[in-house]
Amino acid sequence: MASDLFSLEGKIALVTGGSRGIGKMIAKGFLEAGCAKVYITARKALACDETAKELGDRCISLPQDLSTVEGIQSFVARYLTHEDRLDILVNNAGAAWGAEFEEFPESGWDKVMNLNLKSPFFLTQALHETLKKSGTHERPAKVINITSIDGLRLNPQETYSYHASKAGLIYLTRRMAARLIQDNIVMSSIAPGAFASEMNRVARDHGDEIARRIPSRRIGADEDMQGVAIYLASRAGDYVVGETIAVDGGVALATPGN
């Protein structure tokens, strides 16, 4: 039935970077769509715990720094003490760094590339068997990578490693999706535009100004992100493999100067 297409009833989900911003939006949406449990992880334990408490008993906090393979392995070992399967993984944890070309530091390169590009690969790899256990031809498991419209087009800011990492993750999504579909795991990505968050403080603090440069004339709302994430995670998105959906109010399509 059409009414069941977007249901996540009984599903177990994991959202990285789930304590705030886009990750928190998605975690909340998944719970409202019927997930039995949504695990969230973030580097800052207090923030992770507070968000889980805010979202209710079905949201479980498992704080962890996922920027290293060792951290990922430690996290997965902890997760497997709670669950023996995973239906939905959202690779959302990310970082940004801006500096002029002549001064851009190695630390700003490595931090962003490690968290934005390396971690989604190795976390998905570490959870592969757990996801595989959940997926079937009829109802595959899901992996959703949170990329960015900065991986689709340039913005004026000198965020070299961020641009490179998000563009790389979009193509990595396609490469991994081609492999994982063999195991009944569907991978796709969401490329957000301007959403109010700690990472996008400009949109958070100057939303009206930013909105004037967006074809839709507003920044993204929580429901905009929740809607596309639920679509990809649910039965409705089962046949969408390796694709990136821009959720940006038309920014990536706009011609320069508009």
Image: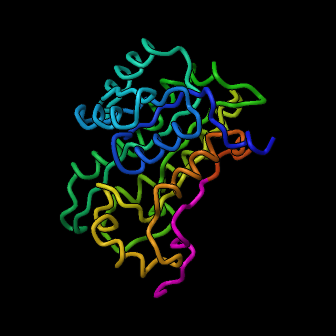
Image check: 109 left or right of 212? left
Which residue is pictured at 22% across the width and 68% down the height?
Answer: 100
Q: Position of residue 31 (x, y in %)?
A: 51, 36
Quadrant of res 234? top right
Q: Among all residues in the image, which is located at the extreme bottom?
A: 257
Image check: 24 left or right of 32? left
Q: Reply above or below: 33 against 138.
A: below
Q: Position of residue 228 (x, y in %)?
A: 59, 52
Counting labels gives 0
Segment colored magenta: 244-258
Q: Among all residues in the image, which is located at the extreme right?
A: 1
Q: Reply above or below: 52 against 194.
A: above
Q: Among all residues in the image, which is located at the extreme top?
A: 81
Q: Position of residue 243 (x, y in %)?
A: 64, 51
Image check: 202 left or right of 179? left
Which residue is pictured at 42% across the width and 30% down the height?
Answer: 59
Q: Nearer the viewer, residue 197 or 91?
A: 197
- Is residue 60 in the magenta section? no
**Colouring rule applied to residues:** rainbow
Quadrant of res 78? top left
Q: Nearer the viewer, residue 6 or 126?
A: 6
Q: Nearer the viewer, residue 179 or 251?
A: 251
Q: Position of residue 105 (x, y in %)?
A: 20, 55
Which residue is pictured at 32% across the width and 24% down the height?
Answer: 70
Tell me the quarter of the image containing the N terminus: top right
Which residue is pictured at 69% across the width and 31% down the height?
Answer: 140
